[in-house]
Amino acid sequence: MAGISQGDKSITTGKAKQVARRTQFRDLDLSLEIHPIRKDLVALVDDNAIKNSVRNILLTNFNERPFNSGSGANLRGRLFEPNDAITRIGLRADIRRSITQGEPRVNVLAVNLQDNPDRNAYNVQVYFLIKEFDTVSNINIELRRLR
């Protein structure tokens, strides 16, 4: 019996064989870079798209997105609190909560905070597992208040 192909199933000799298809994630790069050949915007794909999504969640404050006032991490609000252990615990909790609620494609593994009092800033490293690709990735963000 000859092989017959239907969509994502392949039928040969009377047995069905399921073909796995991996989902491809795409996102718009906010730097708005132009592709040199196509003269079109460059899209972020797979891991980079998910990293960009996590970064956008962390850098979004409450009430910045219309009709979705509770989305985001609201980390800038914590930058004007005293630089102590309670503030760092709150920052870690806000980061974990916002990523867990806003990005279901990842699991947060670790959140590292390092304060930089000379620059009035926190260096944040977030390690997360991308579920679809089963890879560990991280992003680095500097949270800084301006005077």
Image (cartoon, rainbow, N blue to C red):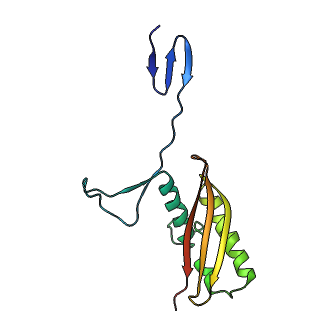
Q: Position of residue 135 (x, y in %)?
A: 59, 51
Name the residue: 33% across, 63% down.
33
Question: Residue 102 or 120: which is nearer the viewer?
Answer: 120
Question: Residue 117 or 101: which is nearer the viewer?
Answer: 117
Name the residue: 73% across, 75% down.
89
Apparent side of residue 3 relative to residue 83 in the rendered image (left or right)? left
Apparent side of residue 84 relative to residue 115 in the rendered image (left or right)? right
* Vertical order, 76 against 100 (above or below): below
Res 91 → quadrant: bottom right
Question: Residue 43 or 109: which is nearer the viewer?
Answer: 109
* Vertical order, 128 against 120 (above or below): above
Q: Position of residue 7 (x, y in %)?
A: 46, 26
* Farthest-out residue, top: 1
- Note whether residue 76 is visible: yes
Q: Position of residue 57 (x, y in %)?
A: 55, 65
Q: Position of residue 70 (x, y in %)?
A: 60, 67
* Vertical order, 131 against 144 (above or below): above
- Note whether residue 68 is visible: no
Name the residue: 49% across, 21% down.
10
* Vertical order, 55 against 131 (above or below): below
Total number of numbered discs in the rendering: 0
Name the residue: 48% across, 57% down.
48
